[in-house]
């Protein structure tokens, strides 16, 4: 039988000695916890994003908008431009909706319970638990991919993901105590990120090695087992880089609903198996090659076309400024087009 108290104590001791220093984190054992705004913002940014990539964005956001009320007051387009490069742009729309709800309904003060946090726009079970545990030191079960990996190896769980998730949540809940719940959640995050890695886990450095059933099998890296994913479909499209001869490029605002909703982008065709060539204006269009991009649910090849012209229905933006504000897929296409122009 797994010795939960001993494992928990060992990991917290390890965390006290090896905790990462992060801009949104209080040190282990701190009596003053990280402000909930900073915890929430960091957790939203870190969804599908690495710490090194998210950290500069976090610093810029908290300098520019130091409170949730400051963030709530920003224009949608300004927020979306600041988010460019973090991907998964629905998160940016949810970020703004949540900030406005906290400001309007709670006077700019985040609620402290998981139930109330879950009721906020765009806040799911993981984020609600993370804010409750880390900001308010409540015993919440914070389970992300890192925690699933640690638990599946610790218990050598033979059920593959995603079917294993309810059992992994149950196993993770065994370790949630009233004592240091925020530090416990962050200790698990650090262990999964730096030691119990997806590939080549550093088992000789793991404070839980003495009780790890996966390690006893000799092949801990085979956990968690995963059901084979279906092949990602592929789509094609055309992207149009239209310049005006003075260093500006034509951008459009994408519809609020749908992929990259509300973001600035290049004019494009539809994205399908056989997209039509439908440039936004008549001009001397020339081919500039193609770029590849992978979204969560499909991969995309964009054929890039470039021309010089004009038009009143565009957001004419200096090319250097456009490159900073565009989502990655459009930035790739812009760079390809400008290089060929």
Image (cartoon, rainbow, N blue to C red):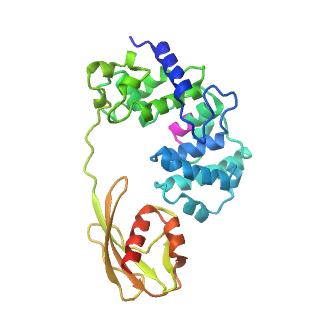
Residue beneath the point at 55% across and 61% down: 80
As drawn, is 142 to the left or to the right of 39? Answer: left
Is residue 207 visible in this depiction of the protein? yes
Which quadrant of the figure contains the C terminus? bottom left
Q: Nearer the viewer, residue 140 or 35?
A: 35
Above or below, 162 relative to 151: below
Residue beneath the point at 48% across and 23% down: 173
Q: Residue furthest right?
A: 107
Above or below, 167 relative to 23: above
Which quadrant of the figure contains the N terminus? top left
Residue 153 inside the magenta-drawn segment:
no
Considering the whole magenta stretch, tell me its main secondary structure: helix
Q: Nearer the viewer, residue 324 or 4?
A: 324
Q: Horizontal and vertical percent for residue 49?
A: 46, 47
Q: Nearer the viewer, residue 155 or 324?
A: 324
Q: Horizontal and vertical percent for residue 21?
A: 57, 37
Q: Horizontal and vertical percent for residue 234?
A: 28, 60
As drawn, is 86 to the left or to the right of 223? Answer: right
Q: Quadrant of residue 335?
A: bottom left
Q: Which residues are magenta?
A: 124-129
Residue beneath the point at 55% across and 63% down: 81
Is residue 141 visible in this depiction of the protein? no
Above or below, 219 relative to 111: above
As drawn, is 16 to the left or to the right of 239? Answer: right
How many numbered callouts? 0
Q: Horizontal and vertical percent for residue 175?
A: 49, 20
């Amino acid at each position: 039988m797994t010795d939960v108290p001993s494992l928990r104590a060992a990991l917290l001791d390890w965390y006290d000695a090896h905790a990462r220093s992060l801009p949104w984190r209080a040190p282990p054992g701190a009596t003053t916890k990280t402000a909930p705004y900073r915890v929430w913002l960091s957790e939203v940014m870190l969804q599908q994003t690495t710490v090194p990539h998210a950290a500069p964005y976090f610093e810029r956001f908290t300098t520019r908008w130091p409170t949730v009320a400051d963030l709530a007051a920003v224009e949608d387009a300004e927020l979306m431009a600041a988010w460019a490069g973090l991907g998964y742009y629905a998160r940016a729309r949810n970020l703004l909706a949540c900030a406005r709800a906290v400001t309007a309904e709670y006077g700019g003060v985040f609620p402290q319970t998981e139930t109330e946090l879950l009721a906020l726009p765009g806040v799911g079970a993981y984020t609600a638990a993370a804010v409750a545990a880390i900001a308010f030191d409540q015993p919440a079960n914070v389970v992300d991919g890192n925690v699933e990996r640690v638990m599946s190896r610790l218990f050598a769980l033979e059920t593959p993901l995603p079917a294993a998730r309810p059992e992994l949540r149950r196993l993770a809940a065994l370790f949630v105590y009233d004592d240091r719940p925020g530090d416990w959640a962050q200790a698990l995050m650090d262990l999964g990120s730096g030691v119990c890695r997806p590939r080549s886990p550093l088992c000789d450095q793991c404070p839980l090695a003495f009780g790890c059933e996966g390690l006893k099998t000799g092949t801990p890296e085979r956990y968690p087992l995963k059901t084979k994913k279906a092949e990602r479909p592929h789509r094609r499209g055309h992207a149009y880089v239209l310049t005006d001869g003075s260093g500006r490029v034509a951008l459009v605002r994408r519809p609020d609903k749908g992929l990259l909703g509300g973001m600035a982008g290049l004019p494009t065709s539809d994205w399908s198996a056989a997209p039509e060539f439908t440039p936004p204006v008549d001009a001397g269009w020339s081919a500039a090659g193609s770029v590849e991009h992978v979204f969560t649910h499909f991969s995309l090849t964009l054929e890039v076309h470039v021309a010089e012209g004009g038009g009143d229905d565009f957001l004419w933006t200096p090319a250097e400024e456009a490159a900073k504000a565009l989502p990655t897929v459009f930035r790739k296409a812009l760079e390809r087009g400008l290089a060929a122009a």
